[in-house]
Amino acid sequence: MVTSVKMGEKTKSHLEDLQALIKLETGKKVTQQRLLEVLIEEAYASQEDIIAHFEDEWEGLSPEEAKRWVSWSIPEGEPIREENLDDVIYQEPTG
């Protein structure tokens, strides 16, 4: 069963570059389908690396999340005593 996959121009260009490099280095012509199969097999064999790649991506807080974090902060001027530290850290958010 063959399935089509949509990809951006940059990704398509990289795929074509790899395809050409394989031809240059090995003298063997490889289809893009076979190249993708090999790439996915290799990625599947190193799943931890692939997963880590996506775990490292962080796009920051959304405006709603940032507002929520700020609302949890302690008002200025209120000193925090060591004996109240746990209460301050684990307090329920207001708002």
Image (cartoon, grey):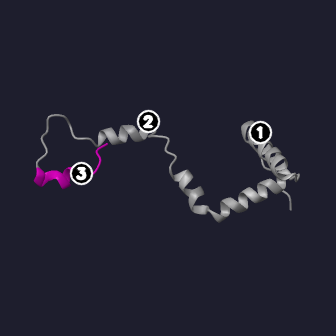
Q: Give the mark nearest the N terminus, 2 or 3.
A: 2
Residue 89: which disc? 3
- Percent coordinates x, y for residue 54 in the rendering: 56, 51
Q: Three-letter amino acid code at disc 1? A: Ser
Name above or below for residue 91 compared with residue 17: below
- Whether tag 3 and tag 1 are in contact, CB under 8 A, the answer is no
Q: Give the mark nearest the N terminus, 3 or 1.
A: 1
Question: Going 39% across and 38% down the picture, which residue do you hit?
Answer: 66
In this picture, residue 17 sits left or right of residue 59: right
Q: Label 3, secondary structure: give it.
A: helix
- Tell which of 71 and 57 is nearer to you: 57
Q: Label 1, secondary structure: give it.
A: helix
Q: Three-letter amino acid code at disc 3? A: Ile
Question: Going 62% across and 62% down the picture, which residue do you hit?
Answer: 46
Q: Which residue is mark 1?
A: 13
Question: Going 14% across and 34% down the picture, which residue do you hit?
Answer: 77
Dot 3, crowdedness within 10 Å: few (<14), some or many (≥20)? few
Dot 2, crowdedness within 10 Å: few (<14), some or many (≥20)? few
Q: Label 2, secondary structure: give it.
A: helix
Question: Going 73% across and 56% down the picture, which residue do you hit?
Answer: 39
Q: Which residues are magenta?
A: 82-95
Task: Look at the image and tell me in which quarter the N terminus lies.
Answer: bottom right
Q: Which residue is mark 2?
A: 63
Q: Give the mark nearest the N terminus, 1 or 2.
A: 1
- Tell which of 87 and 32 is nearer to you: 32
